[in-house]
Amino acid sequence: MSEDVLTTKALQRLKRKVTVENLWMYIIRILEKYGPLKAYEIKKKLAEEYGIKPATITVYIVVYKMRREKLLETVEVGGETLYKPSEKGLMALKEAKSILDWVRKALE
């Protein structure tokens, strides 16, 4: 196996880890920017804003887990459930940004 293949796989793994495997950060940012949305609308915004295209079920699972962790709150509008970031979710995103900044600076 050549170094190019290893590097490519390493970069693909890194990209997956900081996108699909950490959708919660992007979801909070989308909801912070656009206001309360349905889970399906969140999925569309992930693709539009970041080019992240996870499976629909993945988005629903992450949203439900975030709700259980109290990173998101629900709002009922016209009989539909919309999601918005909680204060805890906004603080978690702020901390995540600090961690990512630290990693970037550590690698400079």
Image: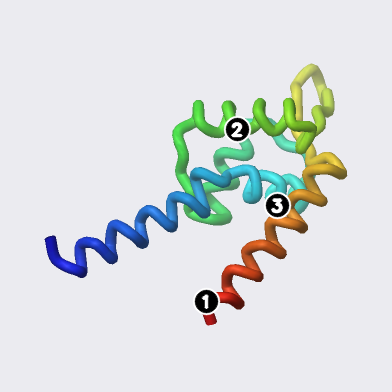
Of mark 3 and mark 2, the one earlier in the sequence is 3
Q: Please tell me which residue is depicted at 68% across the width and 49% down the height of the picture.
A: 30
Q: Which residue is mark 1?
A: 107
Circle 1 crowding by C-alpha within 10 Å: few under 14, some 14–19, many from 20: few
SS of the residue at dot 1?
A: loop
Residue type indicated by callout 2: Val
Of the pair 95 and 67, the residue shown nearer to us: 95
Q: Residue at 52% across / 54% down in the picture?
A: 18
The outermost residue toward the top is: 79
User: Percent position (x, y) of residue 97?
Assistant: 69, 61
Q: Secondary structure at mark 2?
A: helix
Q: Which residue is mark 3?
A: 29
Q: Against 14, is 106 above or below?
A: below
Image coordinates of residue 19 in percent, x first then y, are: 51, 51
Q: Are marks 1 and 3 in contact (CB under 8 Å)?
A: no
Q: Which mark is first along the chain, 2 or 1?
A: 2
Q: Residue 78's image quarter?
A: top right
Q: Residue furthest bottom?
A: 108
Q: Earlier in the sequence, mark 1 or mark 3?
A: 3
Judge whether 42 appears above or below 82 on screen.
Answer: below
Kind of residue indicated by mark 1:
Leu
Give the farthest residue toward the right.
Answer: 87
Query: In the drawing, does residue 71 fall left or right of residue 23?
Result: right
The answer for how far apart the CA atoms under marks 3 and 2 are is 14 Å
The numbered disc on residue 62 is 2
The answer for how far apart the CA atoms under marks 1 and 2 are is 29 Å
